[in-house]
Image (tube, grey):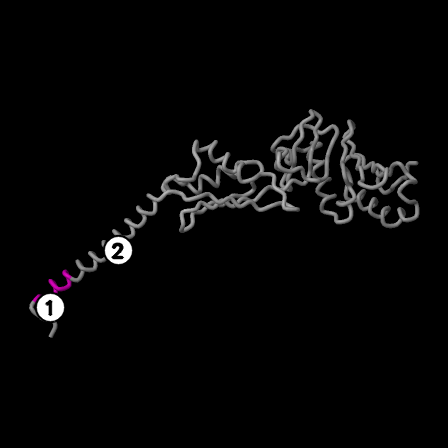
Amino acid sequence: MSYLTRIQKRLPKEAWDSMRRLANLAGIFLVLAILIAAMERKEARVVNRVVVEINPLEEDRYLIDSSDVVRIIVRTFGYGLENLPLARVETERLERVLEEDPFVSEAEVFVDAEVNVHIAIEQREPILRVMDSSGKQYYLDAAGNQLPLSSHYTPRILVATGNIPPYVTDFMEKEAYVLKDLFLLAQLILDDKFLKPMTEQIHVGNNREFTLIPKLGRQKILLGRAQHLEEKLDYLKLYYEKALPISGWKKYRALDLRYKGQIIGVE
Protein backbone atom coordinates (compact mmCIF):
# COMPACT_ATOMS: atom_id res chain seq x y z
CA MET A 1 0.00 0.00 0.00
CA SER A 2 1.46 3.39 -1.01
CA TYR A 3 2.12 6.25 1.39
CA LEU A 4 -0.57 8.43 -0.25
CA THR A 5 -3.11 5.60 -0.02
CA ARG A 6 -2.44 5.19 3.73
CA ILE A 7 -2.88 8.95 4.27
CA GLN A 8 -6.09 8.96 2.23
CA LYS A 9 -7.55 6.21 4.43
CA ARG A 10 -6.70 8.11 7.63
CA LEU A 11 -8.16 11.44 6.46
CA PRO A 12 -11.87 12.21 6.14
CA LYS A 13 -13.14 12.38 2.57
CA GLU A 14 -13.86 16.12 2.85
CA ALA A 15 -10.29 16.87 3.94
CA TRP A 16 -8.85 14.76 1.14
CA ASP A 17 -11.04 16.53 -1.46
CA SER A 18 -9.89 19.91 -0.13
CA MET A 19 -6.25 18.87 -0.42
CA ARG A 20 -6.81 17.69 -3.97
CA ARG A 21 -8.49 20.98 -4.95
CA LEU A 22 -5.61 22.94 -3.44
CA ALA A 23 -3.14 20.83 -5.38
CA ASN A 24 -5.04 21.47 -8.63
CA LEU A 25 -5.13 25.22 -7.92
CA ALA A 26 -1.42 25.20 -7.16
CA GLY A 27 -0.79 23.47 -10.49
CA ILE A 28 -2.87 26.05 -12.34
CA PHE A 29 -1.06 28.95 -10.64
CA LEU A 30 2.27 27.36 -11.49
CA VAL A 31 1.35 27.09 -15.17
CA LEU A 32 0.11 30.70 -15.19
CA ALA A 33 3.29 31.86 -13.51
CA ILE A 34 5.38 30.09 -16.14
CA LEU A 35 3.31 31.63 -18.97
CA ILE A 36 3.49 35.12 -17.47
CA ALA A 37 7.23 34.81 -16.98
CA ALA A 38 7.62 33.65 -20.59
CA MET A 39 5.55 36.58 -21.86
CA GLU A 40 7.56 39.03 -19.76
CA ARG A 41 10.81 37.58 -21.09
CA LYS A 42 9.47 37.86 -24.65
CA GLU A 43 8.31 41.47 -24.18
CA ALA A 44 11.67 42.36 -22.64
CA ARG A 45 13.37 41.27 -25.86
CA VAL A 46 14.16 43.92 -28.45
CA VAL A 47 13.29 43.95 -32.13
CA ASN A 48 15.98 42.18 -34.10
CA ARG A 49 15.26 43.67 -37.53
CA VAL A 50 12.47 45.09 -39.67
CA VAL A 51 11.49 43.22 -42.84
CA VAL A 52 9.45 45.28 -45.33
CA GLU A 53 7.77 43.42 -48.19
CA ILE A 54 5.95 45.46 -50.86
CA ASN A 55 3.80 43.76 -53.45
CA PRO A 56 4.94 45.24 -56.79
CA LEU A 57 2.75 46.72 -59.50
CA GLU A 58 3.00 45.59 -63.11
CA GLU A 59 6.55 45.15 -64.42
CA ASP A 60 7.81 44.89 -60.81
CA ARG A 61 7.40 48.63 -60.25
CA TYR A 62 7.04 50.47 -56.96
CA LEU A 63 5.45 53.80 -56.07
CA ILE A 64 6.78 53.42 -52.51
CA ASP A 65 9.84 51.54 -51.24
CA SER A 66 11.08 50.16 -47.91
CA SER A 67 12.97 53.36 -47.04
CA ASP A 68 9.73 55.32 -47.45
CA VAL A 69 7.99 52.92 -45.05
CA VAL A 70 10.74 53.38 -42.45
CA ARG A 71 10.54 57.18 -42.82
CA ILE A 72 6.75 57.12 -42.28
CA ILE A 73 7.24 55.17 -39.04
CA VAL A 74 10.01 57.44 -37.73
CA ARG A 75 8.06 60.59 -38.68
CA THR A 76 4.93 59.37 -36.90
CA PHE A 77 6.36 57.72 -33.79
CA GLY A 78 9.59 59.65 -33.41
CA TYR A 79 11.73 56.50 -33.47
CA GLY A 80 12.50 53.44 -35.57
CA LEU A 81 11.59 49.87 -34.72
CA GLU A 82 15.00 48.18 -34.65
CA ASN A 83 16.28 47.54 -31.09
CA LEU A 84 12.93 48.72 -29.72
CA PRO A 85 11.54 46.66 -26.81
CA LEU A 86 8.91 44.31 -28.16
CA ALA A 87 6.37 45.63 -25.63
CA ARG A 88 6.44 49.01 -27.41
CA VAL A 89 5.64 47.59 -30.85
CA GLU A 90 2.00 48.47 -31.56
CA THR A 91 1.17 46.37 -34.61
CA GLU A 92 -2.41 47.61 -35.08
CA ARG A 93 -1.41 51.26 -34.79
CA LEU A 94 1.46 50.67 -37.22
CA GLU A 95 -1.02 49.26 -39.75
CA ARG A 96 -3.34 52.25 -39.37
CA VAL A 97 -0.48 54.73 -39.78
CA LEU A 98 0.86 53.05 -42.91
CA GLU A 99 -2.60 52.80 -44.48
CA GLU A 100 -2.94 56.57 -44.18
CA ASP A 101 -0.21 56.95 -46.80
CA PRO A 102 -1.76 57.62 -50.25
CA PHE A 103 0.34 54.94 -51.94
CA VAL A 104 -0.68 52.20 -49.46
CA SER A 105 -3.87 50.24 -49.97
CA GLU A 106 -3.36 47.75 -47.15
CA ALA A 107 -0.69 47.09 -44.51
CA GLU A 108 -0.15 44.05 -42.32
CA VAL A 109 2.32 43.96 -39.42
CA PHE A 110 3.36 40.96 -37.33
CA VAL A 111 6.28 39.75 -35.19
CA ASP A 112 7.87 36.34 -35.76
CA ALA A 113 9.55 33.98 -33.27
CA GLU A 114 12.97 35.57 -33.87
CA VAL A 115 11.53 39.01 -32.93
CA ASN A 116 11.67 40.31 -36.49
CA VAL A 117 8.93 42.80 -37.36
CA HIS A 118 7.39 41.97 -40.73
CA ILE A 119 5.57 44.71 -42.66
CA ALA A 120 3.61 43.64 -45.76
CA ILE A 121 2.38 46.44 -48.04
CA GLU A 122 -0.20 46.38 -50.84
CA GLN A 123 0.19 49.40 -53.11
CA ARG A 124 -2.62 51.41 -54.65
CA GLU A 125 -2.56 51.02 -58.41
CA PRO A 126 -3.02 54.20 -60.47
CA ILE A 127 -5.22 53.94 -63.57
CA LEU A 128 -5.38 57.58 -64.70
CA ARG A 129 -2.90 60.46 -64.61
CA VAL A 130 -4.67 63.81 -64.33
CA MET A 131 -3.29 67.23 -65.28
CA ASP A 132 -6.04 69.60 -64.16
CA SER A 133 -6.82 73.19 -65.14
CA SER A 134 -4.77 74.61 -62.26
CA GLY A 135 -1.66 72.78 -63.41
CA LYS A 136 -1.76 70.21 -60.61
CA GLN A 137 -0.84 66.62 -61.49
CA TYR A 138 -1.88 63.47 -59.67
CA TYR A 139 -3.10 59.91 -60.19
CA LEU A 140 -6.48 58.33 -59.57
CA ASP A 141 -6.75 54.66 -58.63
CA ALA A 142 -9.64 52.33 -59.50
CA ALA A 143 -11.61 53.50 -56.45
CA GLY A 144 -11.18 57.20 -57.28
CA ASN A 145 -8.56 57.84 -54.57
CA GLN A 146 -6.07 60.59 -55.29
CA LEU A 147 -2.38 59.62 -55.37
CA PRO A 148 0.54 62.04 -55.70
CA LEU A 149 3.24 61.53 -58.30
CA SER A 150 5.96 59.12 -57.21
CA SER A 151 9.70 59.80 -57.25
CA HIS A 152 10.32 56.09 -57.88
CA TYR A 153 8.15 55.31 -60.88
CA THR A 154 6.08 57.02 -63.57
CA PRO A 155 3.40 54.56 -64.77
CA ARG A 156 2.58 54.49 -68.47
CA ILE A 157 -1.15 54.89 -68.10
CA LEU A 158 -4.03 56.83 -69.60
CA VAL A 159 -3.55 60.61 -69.30
CA ALA A 160 -6.26 63.25 -68.86
CA THR A 161 -5.68 66.92 -69.69
CA GLY A 162 -7.63 70.12 -70.25
CA ASN A 163 -10.38 71.93 -68.38
CA ILE A 164 -10.52 69.55 -65.41
CA PRO A 165 -11.76 70.99 -62.08
CA PRO A 166 -9.89 70.41 -58.80
CA TYR A 167 -10.05 67.05 -57.07
CA VAL A 168 -12.46 66.76 -54.16
CA THR A 169 -12.87 63.60 -52.11
CA ASP A 170 -16.61 63.34 -52.83
CA PHE A 171 -16.39 64.02 -56.57
CA MET A 172 -18.17 60.75 -57.43
CA GLU A 173 -21.20 61.82 -55.37
CA LYS A 174 -21.69 65.14 -57.14
CA GLU A 175 -24.65 65.52 -59.51
CA ALA A 176 -22.72 67.11 -62.39
CA TYR A 177 -18.94 67.29 -62.11
CA VAL A 178 -16.52 67.03 -65.03
CA LEU A 179 -14.02 64.99 -63.01
CA LYS A 180 -16.74 62.41 -62.30
CA ASP A 181 -17.64 62.17 -66.03
CA LEU A 182 -13.94 61.92 -66.90
CA PHE A 183 -13.35 59.13 -64.39
CA LEU A 184 -16.35 57.13 -65.66
CA LEU A 185 -15.16 57.53 -69.26
CA ALA A 186 -11.67 56.38 -68.29
CA GLN A 187 -13.14 53.30 -66.61
CA LEU A 188 -15.13 52.44 -69.76
CA ILE A 189 -11.98 52.67 -71.86
CA LEU A 190 -9.77 50.74 -69.44
CA ASP A 191 -12.36 47.98 -69.02
CA ASP A 192 -12.42 47.43 -72.79
CA LYS A 193 -9.71 45.08 -74.07
CA PHE A 194 -9.91 46.66 -77.53
CA LEU A 195 -9.89 50.37 -76.59
CA LYS A 196 -7.47 50.26 -73.66
CA PRO A 197 -4.27 49.60 -75.65
CA MET A 198 -5.33 52.05 -78.38
CA THR A 199 -6.11 55.12 -76.26
CA GLU A 200 -3.35 57.41 -74.97
CA GLN A 201 -5.11 60.53 -73.75
CA ILE A 202 -8.47 62.10 -72.86
CA HIS A 203 -8.70 65.86 -73.34
CA VAL A 204 -11.49 67.93 -71.77
CA GLY A 205 -12.44 71.05 -73.73
CA ASN A 206 -13.72 74.34 -72.28
CA ASN A 207 -17.22 73.28 -73.37
CA ARG A 208 -16.97 70.10 -71.24
CA GLU A 209 -16.63 67.96 -74.37
CA PHE A 210 -14.27 64.97 -74.45
CA THR A 211 -11.71 64.21 -77.14
CA LEU A 212 -9.74 60.98 -77.29
CA ILE A 213 -6.16 60.93 -78.58
CA PRO A 214 -5.21 57.45 -79.89
CA LYS A 215 -1.73 55.95 -79.67
CA LEU A 216 -1.69 55.26 -83.41
CA GLY A 217 -2.63 57.52 -86.28
CA ARG A 218 -3.47 61.22 -86.39
CA GLN A 219 -7.20 60.92 -85.88
CA LYS A 220 -8.76 62.67 -82.91
CA ILE A 221 -11.93 61.10 -81.56
CA LEU A 222 -14.58 63.75 -80.81
CA LEU A 223 -16.90 62.23 -78.20
CA GLY A 224 -18.69 65.39 -77.11
CA ARG A 225 -20.30 65.68 -73.72
CA ALA A 226 -20.81 62.83 -71.27
CA GLN A 227 -24.03 61.45 -72.73
CA HIS A 228 -24.41 58.01 -74.32
CA LEU A 229 -20.69 57.32 -73.85
CA GLU A 230 -21.03 53.54 -74.04
CA GLU A 231 -22.96 53.79 -77.31
CA LYS A 232 -20.38 56.18 -78.77
CA LEU A 233 -17.52 53.87 -77.84
CA ASP A 234 -19.36 50.96 -79.45
CA TYR A 235 -19.60 52.96 -82.70
CA LEU A 236 -15.89 53.75 -82.43
CA LYS A 237 -14.99 50.07 -82.06
CA LEU A 238 -17.24 49.21 -85.01
CA TYR A 239 -15.39 51.77 -87.13
CA TYR A 240 -12.01 50.37 -86.13
CA GLU A 241 -13.09 46.82 -86.87
CA LYS A 242 -15.02 47.39 -90.14
CA ALA A 243 -14.16 50.72 -91.80
CA LEU A 244 -10.55 51.34 -90.79
CA PRO A 245 -9.12 48.43 -92.83
CA ILE A 246 -10.72 50.06 -95.89
CA SER A 247 -10.12 53.78 -95.24
CA GLY A 248 -6.77 53.44 -93.47
CA TRP A 249 -5.31 55.55 -90.66
CA LYS A 250 -4.53 58.64 -92.77
CA LYS A 251 -7.83 59.39 -94.50
CA TYR A 252 -9.48 61.35 -91.66
CA ARG A 253 -7.97 63.83 -89.23
CA ALA A 254 -10.90 63.34 -86.83
CA LEU A 255 -13.78 61.00 -86.13
CA ASP A 256 -16.87 62.82 -84.89
CA LEU A 257 -19.17 60.88 -82.56
CA ARG A 258 -20.81 63.87 -80.89
CA TYR A 259 -24.20 63.20 -82.48
CA LYS A 260 -26.28 60.26 -81.36
CA GLY A 261 -26.33 57.24 -83.62
CA GLN A 262 -23.63 58.27 -86.11
CA ILE A 263 -19.92 58.59 -86.75
CA ILE A 264 -18.60 61.19 -89.19
CA GLY A 265 -15.14 61.20 -90.74
CA VAL A 266 -13.59 64.68 -90.84
CA GLU A 267 -10.93 65.09 -93.54
Of residues 96 and 54, the one drawn nearer to the viewer in this rendering: 54
In the figure, 162 relative to 128: above or below? above
Secondary structure of residue under mark 2 = helix
| Residue 134 percent coordinates (x, y) | 69, 24
Was residue 37 drawn as part of the magenta stretch in this picture?
A: no
- Using the rendered view, name the quadrant where residue 82 is placed: top left
Which sits earlier in the primary sequence, circle 2 or circle 1?
1
Q: Residue at x 76, y 37 (%)?
A: 201
Quadrant location, the C terminus: top right
Q: Residue at x 48, y 31 (%)?
A: 75
Q: Specify few, some or many for label 2: CA neighbours under 10 Å numbering under 14, 14-19, or 20 or more.
A: few
In the image, taking residue 80 as reference, residue 136 lies left or right, namely right
Q: Main secondary structure of the magenta part?
A: helix
The region drawn magenta spans: 11-19
Q: CA distance from mark 2 to mark 1?
A: 26 Å
* Residue closest to the far left: 10
Of residues 112 and 32, the one drawn nearer to the viewer in this rendering: 112
Q: Which residue is mark 1?
A: 8
Of residues 18 and 240, the one drawn nearer to the viewer in this rendering: 240
Of residues 86 and 2, the one drawn nearer to the viewer in this rendering: 86
| Residue 194 percent coordinates (x, y) | 78, 48
Q: Which residue is mark 2?
A: 31
- Of the two numbered discs 2 and 1 in the rendering, the one whose residue sits closer to the viewer: 2
